[in-house]
Structures are given as C-alpha cells and as structure tokens.
Amino acid sequence: MLVPVLRVLQTKNPALKITILSRKFLKPIFDKEISGLNVNFVEADTKGEHKGVLGIYKLAKQLKKLQIDAVADTHNVMRSKMLRFFLFGLKKASINKGRADKKALTRTKNKIFKQLKTTHERYADVFRKLGFEIDLSKHQFIIKPKLPKLPFLENLAEDGKKWIGIAPFAQYTGKMYPIDLMEEVIAILSTTKQVFLFGGGKKEVMALSKIKKKYPNVQNVAGKLSLKEELQLIAHLDTMLAMDSGNAHFAAMFGVKTVTIWGVTHPFAGFAPFGQQENCILPNIAKYPNLPCSIYGNKICDGYEGVMRSILVEDVVKKIK
C-alpha cells in the first residue's frame, strides 16, 4: 500500500534519497523492476540482530551512518516508536491510524458507518508532515515487469485466454470466502479463462492442489514461486480475485483490476486496494447491520459466522466478467 505513495513522492522529488526499513522477505516489493522505485533497502532483523531494546538501539546506530535527515514512520508500533526515540536529533513524523474513528466504525452500539480516510492517504500524510506535497490523484503506474521465466507459462502466454488470479485465503476466517463457494467460482471461470491459484503454507497448498486437479485451465502456483516471481506474474493478470488481504494490494500496485470479497471487515476502514474501491464485493448489509465487526478480521460479531455466504457465487463471477 505504501508503493503508490512513494511513487508520487519520488516523481515530485527526484533528488530525494529514500531508504526503506522493513523485513527481508518484503525486499522484492521495492525492487526497481517491480515497483519502479529507486530506493535503498535496509533489513530489520527483529528476530536476530535487532531483537529487543538493545537490538533496536543497534539498528538506530546503523541507520545514523546513512546520514538520514528525516524519519517517516508509516507503522507507528512499539518497535518503530523505540527506533524514533533512539534517532534523536532528526526530523520525524508518524502515521495517525485513526483508532478512534475505526473503533466507532466497528462498534455495535452507536456505530458511525462512514468512509474513513484511506490508508494510502494516511501514509501520504506522514510525508506531508515532513514538508512534502503529495497528490495521489497524480499517481502513474509503471511499465509491467517481465514475466518470470517459468516452463508452465510458455504455452499459456500464447493461447489467448484471459488470465485470472485467485487468492482465496486470508489471515482470519472472518475475511475468507468459504472454500466450497470459491471452488464453484473457479469451476465456472476455468471453462473459458486461465486461472492461477495463489496461497502459502502447507494446508493452503494442499487445498489448492486438490482443486487444481479437478478443473481445466487451472495452475496452482502456491508454494512454487519466490515472492518476486509471484509479483511478476501478478503484474500480467487481467484480473485478481482476492480477500481483504496482501495479494489484493500486490495486484493493485500494478494497476491490475482487483476484485475483493469482504466479510466481517469493510473497505470503509480504509484498506481497499489502491484505486479499486468500485471493485469491492460486500455482504448483505441489511441482513448483517453490525458490519464491519472488525478492522483486521480477528473479531466476529455473534451470529455473523456465515456472513460470507450472503455473497452469491454468480455475483462474484458476474463482477469478474
């Protein structure tokens, strides 16, 4: 979600030197070929070298050697707050997550049901506090990265079918479209489209492998590609179908049409993929008036366990088509 914001920032300020501090596995997202950004990347090894207070202090000392002038904290959690403290003397700004507004959006009594500021705008605000002008309406997508050189893609690129990516999993069950219904979606789409299944973890890989065997024109790439290869493939999809999850944001980063299915969470909280608000599929709000129950999907209102089943398979297919 940060990538579009940084694109606008860098386009407006081409001489600006940007260093991304994050976990190692996220580095491919910021590769120039993938993001179009010209940034440095520093790994935060929070389970090793940079673990605990002393580790964060050590990280701060390492960052000071980069002669940075300002710190943009787009996370604002305990670790990043400690890091900001140790980076004394520098100009700093941190994200306002709007916790009070989000609490009002998710409570069951006196709920304030309205669109909140998007996370993209909240990220942009951090840089605005540091004195930069950012207008996200001026964002421009980059040229797509090249397809990864994978044997199974060679023939598929020539058969003329539309490519549909499907990422049916999420961190919490409250954000997941039931797998039996998703299989129906896959069965319909795979008759005329090329479908790619995305996921991670042994259980997800096994579940998707079983589905892949049942239908034509389905490729299960879960657990088979590096993150960089996944991103390269996602960039060439015609449409991505995902939950309120990371894969949705990966696709939106490239301007791929991204259809998202929402359960106990809601795009009003500000986490809709960049530029894809009109492609959100929502449950029956009249039947489930307490939605959203949760910002992250970890809480489910009583009696809302079946909220996703109010979304019909045919409606999902229709939106994609």
Image (cartoon, rainbow, N blue to C red):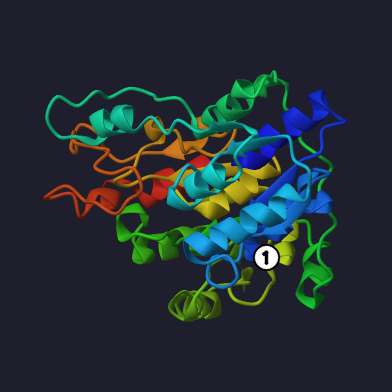
Count how many numbered circles sit on residues in the image.
1
* Near-viewer residue (244 or 89): 89
Kind of residue sitting beneath label 1: Leu
Residue at x 81% of width, y 77% of height: 151
Check disc 1 and report the residue beneath it: 227
Foreground residue, 29 or 73? Answer: 73
- The answer to which quarter of the image holds residue 12 is top right
* In the depicted structure, whether residue 203 falls above or below residue 26: below
The quadrant in which the C terminus is found is top right
- Relative to 298, say whether 121 is above or below: above
In the current view of this chain or complex, which residue is farthest to the front?
Answer: 89
In the visual, does 286 lie left or right of 155? left
Residue, x 44% and y 62% (percent of image)?
169
- For the point 48% across and 53% down, the residue is 79
The answer to whether residue 232 shows anywhere in this view is yes
- Residue sitting nearer the eye, 141 or 298: 298
Give left or right: position of 265 versus 129: left
* Residue at the image position 49 percent from the left and 37 percent from the top: 272
Q: Secondary structure at mark 1?
A: helix
- The answer to whether one can see residue 161 in this image is no
Q: Position of residue 130 (x, y in %)?
A: 64, 24
How crowded is the residue under tag 1: few (<14 C-alpha within 10 Å), some, or many (20+)? some
Position of residue 304 measured from the top left corner of the image (x, y, whole percent): 18, 49
Quadrant into which the N terminus falls: top right
Is residue 32 shown above or below 107?
below
Q: Is residue 100 left or right of residue 314?
A: left
| Residue 256 drawn at (x, y percent) | 67, 43
Residue 288 picture location, percent across and down: 19, 38
